């Protein structure tokens, strides 16, 4: 009896087969809707200067922030995370949603860190133009983001992408389109034997993986949101606190999750202080660091800087409401 979970055959990336509507895109819409709803709930607090914003103001702010998110996440995914050079040679393909046979496939490949950069730029520019308090509104929106982000990771799971490293744990999932690993590797032979998969006569084999998309959905989504919403939000000591807390909290969650998530092909480990015989698909050493973990460390440092600077500003200057000036 196989000691793993087969990826459910009834799960398909397409909502309706043959039509260009995919669960991944729907999950993004659900994520945006949840973030919007939680933002509106917070804006009912009349102590906030941004509570004066109308629903149209919030919709427009979300619209331009989402545009920045999509542009940033796509640019990072097709430059930093793409090692083939395809998009550098053919940059028009970055936002081209069709494959070689003109089948609609959407924009496959998005980077969280790129999306963060793009959305922050768009958010700040819009707030400055409309004279909205950037820090106060930033605290409100960022507190709503993690729960919505949960659904983006569920979309990754439905797509069978961004799967984890191989495992013999009973909850390992056999993703049908996961990268095959060489049967000549001792760890592959051991894990195949433990989970009951025959590798006789095969040079490559598909093995169960950590469902790292679900780990991230919980750590970066549900858990981080619960901490920010129920613990930090009622005790916020100064403007900008929630922004800094999110940067640090997400970085910690992502850093942990990266140990279970397989790095993208061609990237391997950026820092390899552990065993050298540690392929990117094998969970073996905490000292082998991925690109995602490096970016998370940078993000955590930025969060600490935000917290220190915002605390210093709060101590030196009285709070000034800027909306409507």
Image (tube, rainbow, N blue to C red):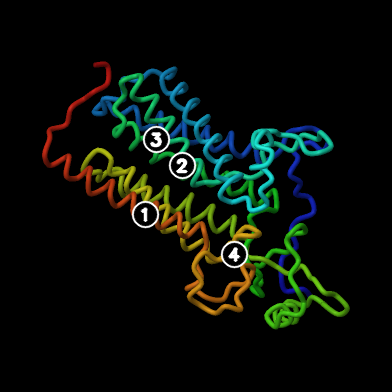
The residue wearing badge 4 is: 268
Q: Residue at x 33, y 49 (%)?
A: 303
Q: Secondary structure at mark 4?
A: loop
Q: Nearer the viewer, mark 2 or mark 3?
A: 2
Q: Nearer the viewer, mark 4 or mark 3?
A: 4
| Image quadrant where residue 30 sits | top right
**Earlier residue among tags 1 and 3:** 3
Determine which residue is flagged by label 2.
116
Q: Please state if 1 lies on the left or on the right of 245 as rendered.
A: right
Camera-nearest label, 1 or 3: 1
Q: Which residue is mark 1?
A: 300
The local secondary structure at tag 1 comes to: helix
Query: What residue is at 47 percent from the left and 36 percent from the top?
Result: 118
SS category of the residue bearing label 2: helix
- Quadrant that contains the C terminus: top left
Residue 249, percent across and down?
Answer: 38, 53
* Label 2, label 3: how far apart the Cα atoms are: 13 Å
- Residue 39, given in percent of the width and then of the height, sits at 41, 32
What's the distance in space between the residues labelled 4 and 3, CA to CA?
A: 34 Å
Looking at the image, is mark 4 or mark 2 earlier in the sequence?
2
x and y percent of residue 98 in the render? Answer: 75, 35
For disc 3, the marked residue is: 141
Of mark 4 and mark 3, the one earlier in the sequence is 3
Q: CA distance from mark 4 to mark 2?
A: 23 Å
């Amino acid at each position: 009896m196989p000691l793993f979970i087969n990826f459910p055959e009834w799960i398909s990336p397409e909502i309706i087969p043959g039509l260009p509507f995919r669960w991944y895109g729907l999950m993004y819409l659900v994520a945006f809707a949840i973030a919007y709803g939680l933002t509106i709930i917070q804006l009912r607090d009349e102590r906030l200067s941004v509570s004066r914003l109308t629903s149209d103001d919030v919709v427009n702010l979300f619209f331009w922030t989402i545009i920045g998110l999509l542009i940033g996440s796509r640019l990072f995914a097709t430059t930093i995370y793409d090692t083939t050079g395809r998009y550098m040679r053919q940059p028009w393909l970055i936002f081209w949603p069709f494959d070689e046979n003109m089948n609609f496939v959407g924009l496959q490949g998005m980077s969280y860190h790129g999306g963060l950069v793009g959305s922050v730029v768009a958010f700040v520019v819009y707030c400055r133009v409309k004279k909205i308090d950037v820090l106060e509104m930033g605290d409100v929106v960022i507190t709503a983001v993690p729960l919505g982000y949960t659904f983006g990771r569920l979309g990754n799971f439905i797509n069978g992408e961004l799967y984890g490293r191989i495992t013999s744990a009973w909850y390992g999932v056999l993703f049908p389109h996961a990268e095959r690993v060489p049967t000549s590797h001792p760890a592959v032979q051991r894990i195949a034997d433990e989970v009951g998969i025959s590798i006789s006569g095969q040079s490559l084999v598909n093995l169960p993986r950590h469902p790292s998309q679900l780990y991230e959905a919980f750590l970066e989504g549900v858990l981080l949101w619960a901490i920010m919403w129920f613990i930090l939000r009622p005790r916020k000591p100064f403007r900008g606190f929630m922004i800094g807390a999110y940067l640090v909290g997400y970085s910690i969650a992502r850093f942990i999750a990266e140990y279970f998530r397989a790095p993208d092909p061609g990237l391997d480990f950026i820092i390899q202080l552990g065993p050298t015989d540690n392929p990117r698909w094998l969970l073996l050493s905490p000292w082998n660091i991925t690109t995602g973990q490096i970016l998370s460390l940078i993000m955590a440092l930025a969060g600490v800087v935000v917290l220190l600077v915002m605390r210093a500003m709060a101590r030196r200057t009285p709070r000034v409401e800027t909306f409507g000036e």
